[in-house]
Amino acid sequence: MRIDMGGHLPKEAVSWTATTSTLFMLPLYKPVIQFYKPSPLNDMCMSRDVLRQSLIAVLSKCPLVFARVTAQPDRSLVLEYNPENSNNPVLEFNNATVSYADLETRGFRLSDVSSNGLNMPVEDGMFTESFESPLLKFKVSFLSDGGIALYSTRHHVLFDGNALFSFVSNWARCTRMLAQNQVPIPPEMSLVQCLNKTGSPKPAEITVDTTQAFSGIVAAIKHAMDPNNMRSCVFSIAASEIKRLKQQTMDSGLLLQGEWVSSNNVLTAFIAHHITRANMDACVYERGPWVVYNSLDMRRLLGLPLRGIGSPLFTVNCLVSYDELMDAKHIFQVAYRVRKCVERCTNGYLQDANDWIAASYKELVKDGIQEPWNHMSFTMLDSNARNLGVSCMDKIPVYDADFGAGRPEMVRSLDNISNYVIALPSPQSDAYHLHVCLEGPAMDALMADPGWNSLCSLMCDS
């Protein structure tokens, strides 16, 4: 059963000037799936009617999420909401023949997700320039033994990882509140006004290409990714191990008085050392330097709600030499380098970046381009180059989605982007779950790496 939720959204039109929620975006869909173990409370707390009613309640509080970015005659950019939009959110229910026990035994494999119809493929593919598909889709699969799989996919135009998990967490909280006859709390919005200046200078580290649409960049890729040769695995690394590496970095003598590195800086350096080596050892890429990209959530820096809906992301790039990557003793140096790159992203710097992108949008609109966001493709997606992306989401409420019968037992990212790692917290927050996507030979090399295996244990394979 599939429900178009558009008719349940507020009927009044909503319009906002362009914000960071819409400026920093990637033209792709990003799916995740959360697995809930069997419980006698599932039938009551996560029934079709309960989930539908609570989703209507939470959606009615945030019409902005389902707006469309449009170029106006005066060249300004606004978000406009219309209940008739074809990209309204959808909710789908499914009775699956597979059991939670079978999925758990097989390690919650992504291949089992698709083969058992637990997913919702995007018609145009994960990378799309079309805004006709729903920006947010949910699929609730009732498993044969009473377990539940909740599949969510959203367009990065308005939902980053923080926003999605915060939205689902709010949906779960809304479900519990309605069960107690309480008024649901609306989700927060990550909004910040952009000045829409003209002629703003481009900050030095902005790594986007405004000269062509995303489809043109994809067409120029020679090192194409074969979806049938990709492997997505989940590894677990204890938080205590990262804490130990962090302390070793602090004691390495590299840092000046008052300087510091974060756990995420150290984790990024550890990941970069092993995954870039695996790619080069497997001859997937030639030997040489790599650019390591860190996703930076701008909410805290710009004073936005930390759990706000939107996609205010920024990517920080750090060039790492071949010699640094090949020698494990340089992990501390790489962690320090990553930290120094992140430090450049002050709130003033990010506001300059906002202004530059807003100005670039305006220039593109002036040239008659009606979808300027498709010309802001981040170069980290160019697989011709030696690029590695790392998103550390250890502070995101990944497992904070209790609809009344308990939190999910396992969460899997379904990203299929090569050389991209998402670090999520474990259910007990005592470890990091590293969702790693690599080409097959590179993954084989990584799993044969003694240094990687000494700290990381395999949880899920493909």
Image (tube, rainbow, N blue to C red):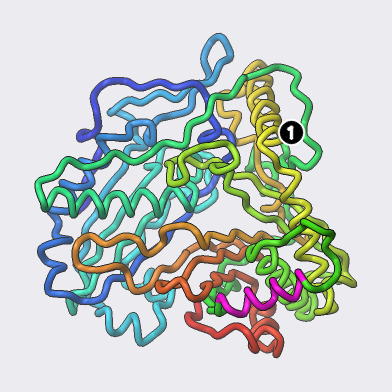
Looking at the image, residue 396 lies above or below residue 88: below
User: Which residue occupies 14% across, 44% down?
Assistant: 182
Left or right of 13? Residue 458 is right
Q: Where on the picture, by quarter, is residue 452?
A: bottom right
Which residue does the image show at 73% across and 78% down from the upper left? 278
Q: Does the stretch in magenta take in 246?
A: yes
* Quarter placement of the N terminus: bottom left
Residue 203: percent from the left, percent from the top? 77, 34
Relative horizontal placement of residue 178, taking residue 36 as reference (left or right): left
What residue range appears in magenta? 239-250
Instruction: Report the side of 461 relative to 397 (left or right).
Output: right
Q: Please identify the dominant SS of the magenta region.
A: helix
Residue at (67%, 81%) from the top-left corner?
A: 446
Q: Nearer the viewer, residue 305 or 137?
A: 305
Picture coordinates of residue 309 (x, y %)? Answer: 42, 41
SS of the residue under disc 1: loop
Image-quadrant location for residue 105: bottom left
Residue at position x 58%, y 33% in the image? 23
- Residue 225 in view, yes or no: no
Q: Is residue 285 visible?
A: yes
**Residue 162 x %, y %:** 47, 51
Q: Is residue 371 magenta?
A: no
Looking at this rendering, what residue extends furthest in the right direction? 323
Amino acid identity at mark 1: Thr
Outermost residue, top side: 74
Front-lying residue, 451 or 182: 182
In the rendered image, the vertical position of residue 68 relative to residue 238, given as above or below? above
Left or right of 311 in this view: 377: right
| Image: 334 above or below 49 | below
Considering depth in this image, is 404 or 49 the residue closer to the camera?
Answer: 404
Please name the residue that numbered disc 1 is placed on: 211
